[in-house]
Image: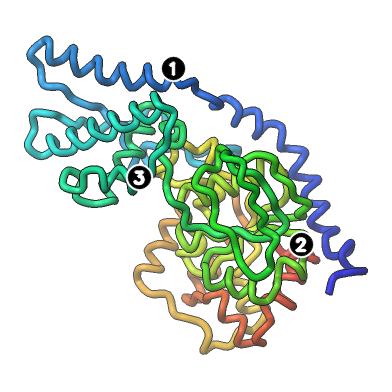
Amino acid sequence: MMGSSAEHLFSEIDKFRAQLLSSVKVMTESQCAEKDISHGEILSRMESVILAMVTSLSRDEAPVLMLPNRSGWANVSFDCDIGLQMSSGHSVTTVRSDCPTSATKFGQILKILSVMYRLVQSNSYSTKRDIFYNDTQLFGSQRTVDIIVDDISCMLKIPRRSLHVLATSKGLISGDLCYLEEDGTRIDCRSSSAAVSVSSNIEGIRNIVSSAKFVLIVEKDATFQKLLDDDFCTKLSPCIMITGKGVPDVNSRLMVRKLWDVLHIPIFALVDADPHGIEIMCIYKYGSVAMSFEAHSLTVPSVMWLGLLPSDLQRLRVPRDSLIPLNKTDESKLSSLLNRPYLAEQPDWKKEMELMQQSKVKAEIQSLAAIAPDFLTTIYLPNKLRYGGWI
């Protein structure tokens, strides 16, 4: 499809990349500040937590743990080069060993801390799932383990993967990309028919090879599979597609950040024209309150909104019966998004969201099929990319 017109197709993308490269230095330098904490330092930080408990016991005092509060907008600040990051003056939650309501959590934290200590000491890795099944009675649910692992990571100011705890990835990736896993396995994402699971150890990835012109973040698995079936990556070659299958897991976010750090190519988001889709795009771009302590390695402030834009629904005359009225939850989410600190930096995004608020309708990417079954892959996306239709 693209043979002779490939140069024209990518001219706007190439121009945009040149703009991005002019600001890339600042971003990579700030990111470098948090690199490589030694095994000795990691063990030392864990030992200092235990030492504080032993000191309390020696004074006949009940040990307590002070966990940074990872919920609430009051605990984060916004930086346009980094996204949402935990404020230096954040509040803390006290977990007491002598209080009936928090004693169980205290024990759970100590258990996971001891597992992490052994993992780092022996230079071995475990998944969050393994930790849960190690003592299901103590933890009760996988979610408890997930929250505590992140709490400890935040308390110690050490990324989870440096604590040797991995998570099974739910994301998928496809396109012009090859790399080596930490164990030397060569991963080739260029198969047009099947996608590759996002790695569980992004930090260990090396030797990334790609001539992709851009990365396309796809909100939903169904849309991602549709693009795969329509051979999108070949038709608009060279590019890379990735999906976190809805709200992205940490590994999908780390992978997008890794691609940005290594390739420095434009990253576009394709999400539903609804408040949920917009929020997912904001997580990739600016991060989340809960993971704000890891903003430097998780956010990609250069992400651009490619579609589906609320203004596209009017411009393309998407049939009315393909549009869905906003419900109360949508309206509440939209109001919340419009009050986010980063919206001041994004007047074009704000206009689109206000348009959604006024029209009181939302639409899924699949609504474009009402215009023509292959409209998304043969007309909508190629034209958006050719004419710079991102904001």
Residue 183 vertical placement versus 198 (above, below): above
**Mark seen at residue 128:** 3
Q: Quadrant of residue 382?
A: bottom right
Q: Nearer the viewer, residue 306 or 124?
A: 124
Instruction: Report the quarter where the N terminus lies.
Output: bottom right
**Mark seen at residue 40:** 1
Q: Which color mode does the image show?
A: rainbow
Disc 3 packing (10 Å; few <14; some 14–19; many ≥20): some
Instruction: Report the quarter where the C terminus lies.
Output: bottom right
Kind of residue at badge 3 = Lys
Kind of residue at badge 2 = Gly
**Residue name at image x 73 percent, y 48 percent:** 265
Left or right of residue 316: residue 21: right
**Mark seen at residue 388:** 2
Callout in the foreground (2, 3):
3
Q: Nearer the viewer, residue 257 or 113?
A: 113
